[in-house]
Image: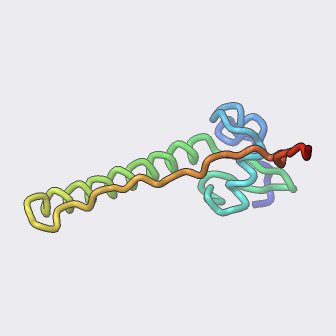
Amino acid sequence: MSEVVRTVDHVTEKEFAKDVGLSPRSLEAQRQRGLIPEGEVWVKQNGRIFYSRSGWDSWVEKQRNSLMESRSKVIESSSASAGTASGAAKRTRIRQHRKTSKEPAVYAVK
């Protein structure tokens, strides 16, 4: 792609961050980790990053549909075994560590 993207659909990272309510740094981090797909959602041209609004919308919709499908499969599998002896596993609480003071205790010697 030698021509520069200059359509309304493609915007700079800073503009796009404002549109979706994320910081430019957050978008950059997600992009570098491969969470946001290159080509479909963003492209790099002449050293600059451009995001596609329509690409983002379709990608988010795919993610939402995938999540809904996986949730419905979990519901179907748990409802199929609801009356059996094994049944659905009960969730256990995970204890969170208590926050302690970072300052060490001070003792007076008398």
Quarter of the figure that contains the C terminus: top right
Residue at image position (20%, 62%) is 77
Q: Residue 79: x percent and y percent? A: 15, 56
Tell whether 65 sits left or right of 81: right
From the viewer's side, name the closer residue of 9 and 92.
92
Residue at image position (63%, 35%) is 20
Q: Residue 12: x percent and y percent? A: 77, 41
Outermost residue toward the front in this view? 110
Residue 24 picture quarter:
top right
From the viewer's side, name the closer residue of 36 and 102.
102
Residue at image position (82%, 46%) is 105
Give the mark count.
0
Tell whether 76 sits left or right of 97: left
Residue at image position (14%, 63%) is 81
Quarter of the figure that contains the N terminus: bottom right
Outermost residue toward the bottom in this view? 86
From the viewer's side, name the closer residue of 85 and 19.
85
Outermost residue toward the left in this view? 83
Q: Residue 15: x percent and y percent? A: 75, 34
